[in-house]
Image (cartoon, grey):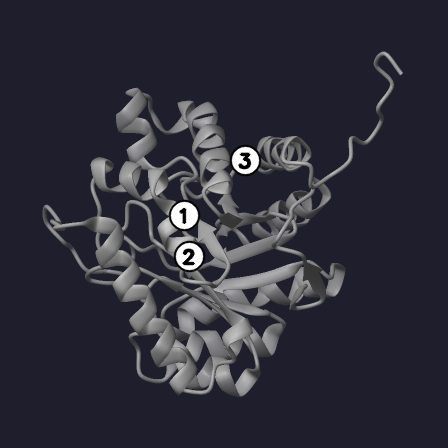
Amino acid sequence: MRRIGHREFDFSRQVAVMAIINRTPNSMHDRGRTYELDLAVRAARRAVADGADWVDIGGLAFRADQDDLSVAAEIDRVAPVIEAVRAASDVVISVDTHRAEVARAALAAGADVVNDTNGIREAAMAKAVAEAGAAVVVTHSIGGPRTEVSRPTYTDVVSEVAHFLRERVRHAIDAGVAPDRIIIDPGHDLNKNTYHSLELTRRLSEIAAIGHPTLAAVSNKDFIGETLDVPQNGRVEGTIVANVVCVLQGARILRVHDVPQAVAAVRMTEAILGWRAPVSPRHNL
């Protein structure tokens, strides 16, 4: 069993569903639908009611062409949402940030996890996580947030991502983060093209073999849209398939936009694998 925040997970036979809550005016998928504070809080509470185990609250987009915020402004976006959700639920709360000062403020507001798409590159981040006794998601990207990487290339994307993650995990542990507080994310589509993300999905077991719980963040991403030639609002089915494949390859946390669909897919996958009993078996019994 692994305790994250107020909840325990048996990742040998359980998958956690992480709901995405973006307090950004122009996020890739939400397009600002949860930018206003009350809308963000309402979306987080709805996600919990729909079965999410976890909510991931972010105030600054990864892409370089998105709004540029001061640290104080980013804190003003995420901290009130975290406080409101924490007051209403024992759900796991993560803050999606690469800034140590934002992470400290979010943890003080009630967050349990720092979801760092910068792979703990900022010198103070590991220290902030270690001092709080928090968990951290270590994510792969070449340039990190807000950095444009044109036509990224890899000799072997899976091997190179795995090498990066092992190195950054070692850095986190050396800085005092407990090994059982570390989660890894190969960073689908982050400085990767569609072929790279498909290969990461196909060979995700090689990432999971690193030995820390693996998070898959594939929801509605461009590699799904380009594979199927569908727009942002037509990627639900492709996302469900990608999520299930990731679970079969070892992912144990799924970061998603469409919570009810993801929860149903996860619970069905767990049942097929023999990890979860049917809720109301009656047919031919």
Residue found 81% across the figure and 31% down from its top: 279
The residue singled out by tag 1 in the image is 205
Looking at the image, residue 117 lies above or below residue 167: above
For marks 3 and 2, the one nearer the N-term is 2
Q: Nearer the viewer, mark 1 or mark 3?
A: 1
Mark drawn on residue 209: 2
* Cβ atoms at labels 1 and 3 below 8 Å apart: no
Instruction: Answer whether residue 52 is visible to the viewer in this image.
Output: yes
Which labelled disc corresponds to residue 121? Answer: none
Q: Amino acid at mark 2?
A: Ala
Say which label, 1 or 3, has the lower sequence index: 1
**Crowd class of label 3 (few under 14; some 14 to 19; many from 20; radius 10 Å):** some
Give the distance between the C-alpha atoms of the residues marked 1 and 3, in whole angstroms. 24 Å
Q: Secondary structure at mark 1?
A: helix
The quarter holding residue 144 reads bottom left
Q: CA distance from mark 3 to mark 2?
A: 28 Å
Q: Position of residue 131 (x, y in %)?
A: 52, 87
Secondary-structure class at tag 3 = loop
As rendered, which of 99 and 222 lies closer to the eye?
222
- Circle nearer the viewer, 3 or 2: 2
**Residue at 51% across / 77% down in the picture?**
105
Does 179 sit left or right of 17 as displayed? left
Say whether marks 1 and 2 touch (CB < 8 Å): yes
Residue at the spot of label 3: 258
Seen at 59% across and 70% down, the residue is 112
